[in-house]
């Protein structure tokens, strides 16, 4: 496939339709002419749009085995070689509005040395960064370079998000040391984000390592070396995630301990209050039986004397508890 008609790459609702110029820039694909495949063409599609769905299911440029994968069937990061082409599925941090970053977006791409077909549903900001470089003439020059730049941008966003989670854990640890409880659900959300990242970034690191070790014809040795560096960087991020998960476990135990201590202090205080007023409760109950012979029953100052005696009794019990170091 050295030359293809431009109309074969024409998709009415394509997100992007470019051809790399080999100098770090891009040119638009002319639907009325022919495309010389000495430089790779890049189609970026939203697989939920009808025009893209139709093109993915009917174009002769794609092998049948990748149509379903590009249309949203695969979710877990993976790489599969298919003759001269390679099918790759990656996950990226979700920076779309009204979405949590841990609700990762999926990015799928089938690529050869002459053709790059990528699909997504939700916007992938890492791809927009690479496109911005291409539009300014400082982007990738071939298929291998394009893949390295995409993986590098995705890993940069992942590392930034991991650092953000790390800072949140530090803030929470400082608050706990000052006896301040985190907001309800904050710890659970933090641990969920860490676990989701761990689940998907571990196989993604393996994808990068495999791309670095595979002898793909459209990747040179320098690009393989850079891909291995990206895999190593993501691996260090995974180590940070494992450490953060362990720290949240310790933090959760400390929070539980602080809550238990607070509850014990309240229970202890209530028990002491009950002890202080226990003798007075006994006496008021005894003098309230309404039977004859109650001492001071016929004395005009009897009630006042009784109240004074109760006050002295309360103060005496409180003094005794403090001397016994219970208070």
Image (cartoon, rainbow, N blue to C red):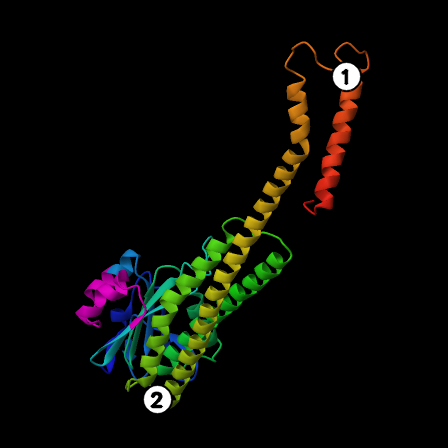
Nearer to me, 283 or 60: 283
Estimate the x, y position of residue 87 in percent, counting from the top left: 27, 73
* Mark 1 or mark 2, whichever is nearer to me: 1
Residue 280 vertical position relative to residue 36 in the rendered view, above or below: above
Q: What's the residue at 32%, 76% (across, down)?
A: 41
Q: Secondary structure at mark 2?
A: loop
Quick one: quadrant of the N terminus?
A: bottom left
Label 2 CA crowd tier, 10 Å (few <14, some 14–19, many 20+): few
Q: Secondary structure at mark 1?
A: helix
Quarter occupied by residue 195 = bottom left
Residue marked by disc 1: 303
Residue 217 vertical position relative to residue 253 in the rendered view, above or below: below
Magenta region includes residue 64: yes
Residue 180 vertical position relative to residue 277 in the rendered view, above or below: below
Magenta region includes residue 92: no
Nearer to me, 18 or 203: 203
Quick one: quadrant of the C terminus?
A: top right
Q: What's the residue at 74%, 45% (across, down)?
A: 323
Estimate the x, y position of residue 89 in percent, counting from the top left: 31, 69
Q: Is residue 69 left or right of residue 144?
A: left
Looking at the rendering, the stretch of residues picked out in magenta corresponds to 54-78
Estimate the x, y position of residue 46 in percent, counting from the top left: 33, 61
Q: Earlier in the sequence, mark 1 or mark 2?
A: 2
Q: CA distance from mark 1 to mark 2?
A: 102 Å
Estimate the x, y position of residue 6 in percent, counting from the top left: 28, 73
Prevailing secondary structure class for the magenta stretch in the rendered image: helix
Residue marked by disc 2: 220
């Amino acid at each position: 496939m050295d030359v293809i008609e431009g109309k074969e790459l024409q998709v009415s609702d394509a997100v992007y339709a470019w051809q790399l110029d080999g100098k770090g820039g891009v040119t638009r694909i002319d639907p009325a002419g022919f495309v010389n495949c000495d430089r790779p063409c890049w189609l970026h599609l939203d697989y939920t749009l009808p025009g893209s769905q139709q093109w993915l299911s009917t174009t002769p440029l794609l092998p049948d085995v990748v149509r379903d994968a590009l249309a949203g069937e695969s979710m877990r990061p993976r790489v599969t070689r298919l003759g001269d082409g390679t099918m790759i599925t990656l996950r990226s941090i979700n920076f779309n509005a009204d979405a949590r970053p841990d609700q990762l977006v999926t990015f799928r791409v089938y690529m050869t040395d002459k053709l790059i077909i990528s699909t997504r549903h939700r916007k992938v900001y890492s791809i927009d960064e690479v496109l911005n470089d291409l539009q300014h003439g400082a982007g990738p020059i071939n298929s291998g370079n394009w893949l390295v730049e995409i993986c590098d941008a995705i890993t940069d966003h992942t590392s930034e998000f991991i650092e953000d989670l790390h800072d949140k854990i530090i803030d929470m640890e400082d608050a706990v040391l000052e006896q301040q409880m985190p907001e309800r659900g904050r710890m659970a959300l933090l641990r969920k984000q860490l676990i989701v990242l761990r689940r998907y970034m571990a196989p993604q690191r393996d994808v990068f390592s495999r791309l670095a070790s595979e002898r793909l014809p459209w990747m040179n040795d320098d690009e393989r070396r850079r891909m291995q560096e990206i895999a190593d960087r993501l691996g260090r991020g995974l180590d940070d995630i494992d450490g953060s998960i362990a720290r949240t476990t310790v933090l959760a135990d400390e929070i539980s301990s602080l809550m238990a201590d607070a509850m014990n202090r309240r229970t202890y205080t209530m028990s002491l209050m009950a002890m202080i007023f226990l003798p007075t409760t006994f006496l008021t109950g005894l003098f309230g039986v309404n039977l004859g012979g109650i001492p001071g029953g016929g004395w005009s100052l009897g009630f006042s004397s009784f109240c004074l005696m109760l006050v002295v009794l309360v103060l005496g019990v409180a003094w005794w508890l403090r001397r016994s170091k219970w208070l």
